Amino acid sequence: MKPSKNTAAAMDAAPADRPRPPSTGWWAAVSRTPRGGIAVALLLRVVLFSTVVTLLLTVFQLSLSYRNERARLDGRFAEIEQASARSLAESLWAVDTRQIEEQLDGIVRLPSISGAEVRDTGASGRPFTLFRGQRQANGVVKEIPLACCGAKPQPIGVLRIEATLDEIYRDLAAQALVILLSNGAKTFLVAFFILFIVHKLATSHLRDMAASARSVSLEGDTVPLRLRRARSEGDELDQLVDALNAMRERLARQALELRNADARMAAILDNLPDLAWMKDTEGRFTAVNRAFAAAKGFADPAEMFGKTDLDVHPPGLARSYRNDDAEVMAARGTRRIEEQHARADGSVGFIETLKTALIDADGRVAGTVGIARDITERRQAEADREARRAAEIASEAKSAFLAHMSHEIRTPMNAIIGMGYLLLQEELKAPQRDQVQKIHRAATLLLGIINDILDFSKIEADRLDLEAIVFDPRDVLEGVSDIVGLAAKDKGLALQVELPPGLPKALEGDPSRLRQVLLNLGQNAVKFTERGGVTLRVRVVEAQADAVRLRFEVQDSGIGMSIDQRQRLFQPFTQGEASTSRRYGGTGLGLAISQRLVHMMGGDIDVESLPGQGSRFGFELRLPLRSPARPQRAPAPADPSRLIGRRVLLVEDNPINAEIALSLLRRAKLEVDVAEDGEQALQMLEGARYDAVLMDCLMPVLDGYEATRRLRQDPRWQDLPVIAMTANALVGERAKVLAAGMNDHIAKPINVDELYGTLAHWVGPAVPPA
C-alpha cells in the first residue's frame, strides 16, 4: 500500500522512533500547552503588556480631555465676566432686581453652570442677595467682583457663579469606555495573532524537539531530528536543531567512550591482585572484583551482590568491618586500616584497607568503597627486618661488650705479665725466679685462654673478619714449627715438617688465622702425645692458573679418640671426656674456634683417629695465587740499642700500665714523657719535640682517637709516628686506629719484642750528633 502524502510528510517531519503529534489545529495545540508553556506565557505577557499600555494611554488621554474641559469652563467664566459683570454692577447700583434676575437666569442656562448669585457688599448697610439655579456641594465656584460707577468705580458687590463637573465626568467616562473597548479588542486580536504565529513558527517545532530529545537513547543509534518545514537560511530554529543533533552525536560518542571506559575499568579491577568492593549504606555488596570474589570462594562476582559481611566473613571480623564502615560514613571521609582477613581456605592473613565514603550526586552518603591489599608477606618481611635489626643491635651490643671486656681483662693481664717480665729482668734468687717464672707462664696461659674465649665470642657475634693479604706459606709454617717444636722438645717428642717441592711462594689469604689454626692443632697434638712424635704436613691437591688447593695435616701418635668423642670434638667447651680435661687441661674452645675459622676460609676440618693409635687432623683451602709482594713491614730486630736517644711521648691513663711501659722504654735508653690523657698530650706536644707517640685509645677527658685526629690537623705533626697501644684486641681495632690517623697498633699485654720492633720500624736508630 502506497503511503499517503500526509503520512510521508509526517515521516519526514519527525524521527521514526516517536509518533507524530496530533494535527488538530493550532488552537488545539495551544490549548494542550502545559501550564507555563511558551504560548500561554507569551499570550499572558502580550495581554498584560497591552492592557497596561492601554490603561496608561487612556489615563493620559482622559487627563488631557479633563484639562481641556476645565480650560473651556474657565473660558466660560471669563466670558460671563466680560459680558455680564458691568451690567450686573449697574443693576445692583440701581437696585434693579428684575434686571438682575434675568441676567442670572441667562447665566444659569449656560452649559455646566448650576447656579449664580449676586451679593451686595456696599456700605449702605442693606444686605442684598439674589440666587438663581441649584446649590452644588462639590462644584466649581467663581466669584467676580462688581464695581460701579464714575471715573473711579468702587466695589459694590460680588457675582458668585457655581459650575458642576458631572457633565465633564460623564464625557470622560464615555471616552474611557470607547478607548478601552477599542484598544482591548485590538490587544486580543494582536495577541491571538502573535500566538498563532509563534505556534506556527516556534512552539510546534519546539514540541517536536522535546519529543525527539525524550527519545534519545544511549544504548543504540538515534535518528537525527528534522523540522516539519523546509529548511531556511539557517535561522535560530535550524541552528538549534543542528546543535541538538550535534549534541546527540556527542552523547552517543561519550556513551560509547563511557561504556568502553567501564569495560576497561572492569577489566582492570578484575585483573588487579588487590581486593575491591562497593557497599550500600546497609552493608550489602553492590560490586566486587574477581580477586575479592575468589578470596571469598565465589566463582562469579555477581554471586556476592546483596550479601553482607556476615555472609562472607567470620562474625568477629564482620562486626569489625561493619564498625569501620559506619565510622567512614559518619566522617564522610577516608580511612586507612590494617586488619585481619579470613581467606576462603580458612587461613587468616593481614590486609591494608583503604575505605572511602561513597557520596551521591545529591551529597548524601550512599555507602562505602574499599580496596585492600594483602600485606601478610610485607608484615612478615617487616617482622624479619625488625628481627634482623634486633639481632644487629644485639650483635653490636655483643661487640661493644667484647671490646669492653677485652680492654678490662687485658689491662690487668698487661700489668701481671709486664710486672712479671720486669721482675725476671732483675737479679733474683733461684726460688724467687722460679716463682716469678711460674706466675709469668700461668699469666701467659691465662692470656691464651682469654684470647680463645674472645675469639669464640667474636665468631659467635659474627664480628670476626678475615684479612686478604699476600703471604708466603713457608713463613707461616716456619713460625708454627718454631713454637710447636719447642713444646715437643720439652716433652721429648720429634717434630717433622713435610713441604711439597712446588709450594707457591705468594698466596692471598689471612696468614695470622691460618697460623692460629695450625698452632692449635699442633699444640693439641703435642699435648695429647706422650711418646713418638708429631708431623706437620702440606700437600698440593690441585694447581690451577690462578689458584692452588692445599691440604694441611697435623698427625700425632697420641692417645687417639673414639667415634663418640670425635662426634663431640668440635662442640665449644667440650673435650673427649671429663678425665681428659682434668688431666690435660684446656677450655675445649680451641678446636671449635679452629673449625669456625677454617669454615670462614672456605674449608672443613676432618679427623681420623682410633683410641691408642693417634689422630690426624686435616683441612683443604683454595688460595688465590699472587705475585710475590714486597714486605709491607720488615720486622726489626728486638734490639733496644737501636732506640737509644730517641724521645717518646707515652699517653696512658692507667698508672700500672704507664709504669710498665715506662720501665720497658727506659730499659731501651729512650727518653720518655708521660701524659695522662689526650688533652694533656696535645699540650705537651706544643712544648717539646718527640720522635713518636705511644697512644692509649680509651682514656678520660680526650681519648686517643680524637687526640690523634686533632694532632693530624696540625701540619707540624703530619708525619709524627703515632702508635696505638691498647688493650682492645678485636679484629676491627687495627682498622679503627689507622682510620683515626695512627700509624700502627700494639696490643696489650705488651710483647716486649713487638714493642721494640714496632718502634724501631717507625723511629729508627738515633743519628749521633756531629
Image (tube, helix red, strand yellow):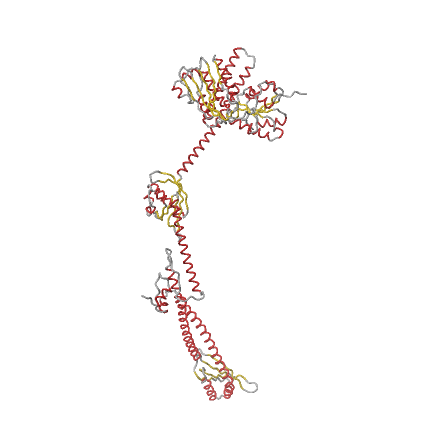
| Residue 218: percent from left, percent from top | 38, 56
Q: Assign the N terminus to one quadrant of the image.
A: bottom left
Residue 662 visible somewhere in the drawing? no
Closer to the camera in the image, 144 or 702: 702
- Along the line of sight, the residue nearer the viewer: 172 or 685: 685
220, above or below 192, in the image:
above
| Quadrant for the C terminus in the image | top right
**Residue 34's spot in the image, x, y percent?**
36, 64
Say if 654 sits above or below 370 in the image. above
Farthest residue, direction top: 430
Establish if 175 lies above or below 314. below
Residue 520 pos. (x, y %): 47, 20
- Residue at 38% across, 19% down: 563
The answer to whether residue 646 is left or right of residue 527 is: right
Left or right: where does residue 658 sit relative to residue 136? right
Give the vertical position of 679 relative to 62 (above or below): above
* Left or right of residue 260: residue 658: right
Residue 33 appears in the picture as rendered:
yes
**Going 43% across and 34% down the picture, which residue do you hit?**
386
